[in-house]
Image: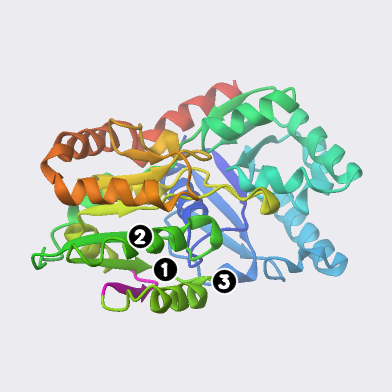
Amino acid sequence: MQNIKHFLIFRDFPPQKGGMSTYYYNLVKFLKGKKIVFLPKDDENPPFIENTKYIIAPFKKGEEKNIFFTLIWFFQIFFNLIIENPDFIHIGKLRPIIYFFEIFKILKKKIIIYFHGLDYYEMRKKSFLKRKIVYYAIKKADLITCANKYVLEIIKKENKLKRSYILYPGIDISYFENVKNKFEEKKGEEFVILTVANLVKRKNVDNVLRALSFLKEKYDFKYYIIGKGKEEENLKKLVKDLNLSKNVYFLGELGEEKFKYYKICDIFIMPSRFLEEESSFEGFGIVFLEASFFKKFLIGAKTGGIPEAIIDGETGVLVKEPENYFEIYEFIKDYFENPLKYKEMKEKAYERTIKEFDVKKLIENYENFLLEILK
């Protein structure tokens, strides 16, 4: 696929943080051929990737509702489409580019639309006309690529698709192998619990804190929280209210240093909740793969795509009711009391990640599928 050209239109990309940014970064990094990537102003300093050209839109995320910005963006895209003549157009967020879908089809390019979960659910709450436009685009697209089986099944129930593909998030195993030895594994006698997440309500950190409040008198532990977000101040207040200030540490956003905490933690926890009112749920949870590479005990939740990242009872455990912090408490307490009980589970999680979620292999298989579309 060295001579293939990819035209990629994304709203989430580094330096933005989060699973979707990582997902699209890995896609661009490991796709072969030339890549032309359109990004909003939020990403105006993207990382260098070989054979990749970046074009920055004149607006930040959320500003594309302005018709003036949208028209400028459209002409940017259309001009570069004519100049570059790509084989594939990858669309990572439909709005507002969906309104120009027919023009893309006239140019006879293969169009791929990506969904993670939240993006599709958000669309279902739009006006009748906007929903119809999106459903039309999904029907006419050459390929619908989803980051999990959960959302693909929902899309299939409501739409007739030409083709579909599940491209799971993955991690760069060779990179992880190199970085894991950069940091020493220094820790005391206490148990260490870790969450790496955007601090939003969906991540359910508040109920993790409530669960830990029942453990602080009997067990010695530290809970490290890596990430930032609009719930951070509420969570810090909750820590004080629960008298957990000596146990809980907010570390903010970290780069490679986060791997130091993956190495020293005993438990990685993110029992994300499903927020119906916000159409918000966990699409997969790439952080579970990162933690499993370091052979950590995983606690997730039976919501969204998490059951595809964690096989319940085999590679980790899933909280059935994320609002029930006593259930979270029981899982943590059982590990504190019986850590050897979970040794085989941690090994299985590591082996599955190495075997099934090496991002290079995932994208190599995806490229082979794309070649079939071109034939």
> What residue sits 67% from the left and 54% below the top?
278
Q: Which mark is residue 195?
A: 2
Point out the stretch of residues depicted in magenta: 247-255
Closer to viewer: mark 1 or mark 2? 2
- The residue that mark 1 highlights is 227
Q: Secondary structure at mark 1?
A: loop
Picture coordinates of residue 110, whole percent (x, y): 67, 33
Q: CA distance from mark 3 to mark 2?
A: 28 Å
Q: Secondary structure at mark 3?
A: loop
> What residue sits 60% from the left and 70% below the top?
42
- How is the rendered protein coloured? rainbow
Quarter where residue 197 is shown = bottom left
User: Tag 3: residue type?
Assistant: Glu
**Mark 1 vs 2: CB contact within 8 A:** yes
> What residue sits 56% from the left and 68% below the top?
43
- The residue that mark 3 highlights is 44
Query: Front-most of 202 and 109?
Result: 202
- Does the image show residue 256? no
| Left or right relative to 154: residue 325 | left
> What residue sits 42% from the left and 55% below the top?
50
Query: Front-most of 363 and 159?
Result: 159
Q: Secondary structure at mark 2?
A: strand
Which quarter of the rendered picture does the C terminus lie within? top right
**Mark 3 vs 1: CB contact within 8 A:** no
Mark 1 closeness class: few <14, some 14–19, many ≥20 residues within 10 Å: many
| Left or right relative to 148: residue 131 | right
